Amino acid sequence: MEANFMEAKNILGGNTEGHLRPNLSQIERLKQFARQSASMLNLDRLDRELDQKLDREIASETGMSQPTKAAVIVIGGGEDKVQDRKILRAFVESSGGTSARIGIIPSASREPDIIGRIYSDIFRDLGAEFVDVFDIRDRRDRYQDDPGRLLDDFTGVFMTGGDQLRLCAIIGDTPFALAMRERVHQKRLVLAGTSAGAAAMGHHMISGGSSGETPHKEIVNMATGLGILPEIIVDQHFHNRNRMCRLMTAISSHPEMLGVGIDEDTAAVFEHDNLIKVVGRGAVTIIDPVEMSYSNQLWVSNTAPLTVHNLRIHILAAGAEYNLIKRVPISPSV
């Protein structure tokens, strides 16, 4: 590992001291080199250790802030706000702990003032250094003027529950939303969303529908989301509201996507190493159509039952993980 790390340092010219401050693209090339070195040995653990060591060493030697581990925290709604607040605490810790600077987007709610104050109080109680509410109620809001400079002052952003259609109508494809997505992908910002804020994470978004019925096309309504995690379709309050068939129907229409159903007081934490980690008291359900061999979705009527063959379904409780690249679950150590 030491030899590989020293070789990676040489990509920067052999010296990371003095005035040298590598940009994000240089750091990503360093990390790619480390991952390739580990892959040649077929050592996944070494791969992750090299990634983490490079983050720590480069941050220390260049003065740059260390990239966050969690990129996106997708919460199924109904998270504990009173007792141990495990999920909200994890968001604050991922955003920097006592150095966290958190912005709240309550745009999905019909009572943004009230919901904004509730989460502001919670995040301050959990030790965040600074908390502010982005009170965005119009696509031409002042927050759209220079969103990049605004977001550079924050380490985490939290999108509240409410109505995902309302949220996307207000901020979808605006300069603010595009700047937020860019910073998440650059590992400069932790983004969390609960309920409606979770549903909006994908490009294809479940905007409504019914529960507890046999899969058919009218059971689910689709719209365009924020595209933070474009490869997934999220459904929230999942087992609590019996939404398995709804998500199955959505995936049968978009077999290139991955379905992620999240229970209440549960979160799917999307980390930068392409792992989903489960946190909370419920479960995360993964619906993977990679081996789907048949669907009659294209030609049956809207109310006719669907026939779908060979969907993969994984149920993951707290501590379990899922590899997004290999499409395999990882059981927690016993």
Image: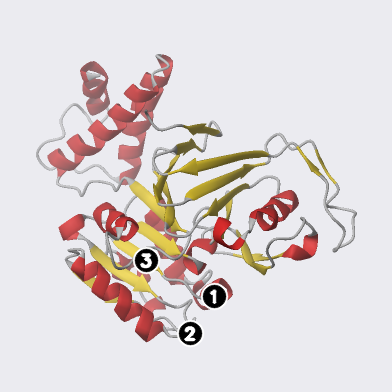
Q: Which residue is mark 3?
A: 158
Name which residue lies at 19% across and 42% down.
Answer: 59
Of callouts 2 and 3, the N-terminal one: 2
| Mark 3, other Cα within 10 Å: few <14 / some 14–19 / many ≥20 | many
Amino acid type, mark 1: Asp
Residue 330 visible, this angle: yes
Q: Is residue 189 above or below residue 319?
A: below
Give the mark, 1 or 3, whose residue is nearer the N terminus. 3
Q: Secondary structure at mark 2?
A: loop
Q: Is residue 153 visible?
A: no
Can you give x and y, in whole percent of width and height, for residue 157 in the image? 34, 65
Q: Disc 1 designates what residue?
A: 163
> What's the CA distance linking mark 1 and mark 3?
15 Å
Going by the numbered disc 3, the residue's amino acid type is: Phe
Q: Residue at x 51, y 74 (%)?
A: 167
Which of discs 2 and 3 lies nearer the camera? The answer is 2
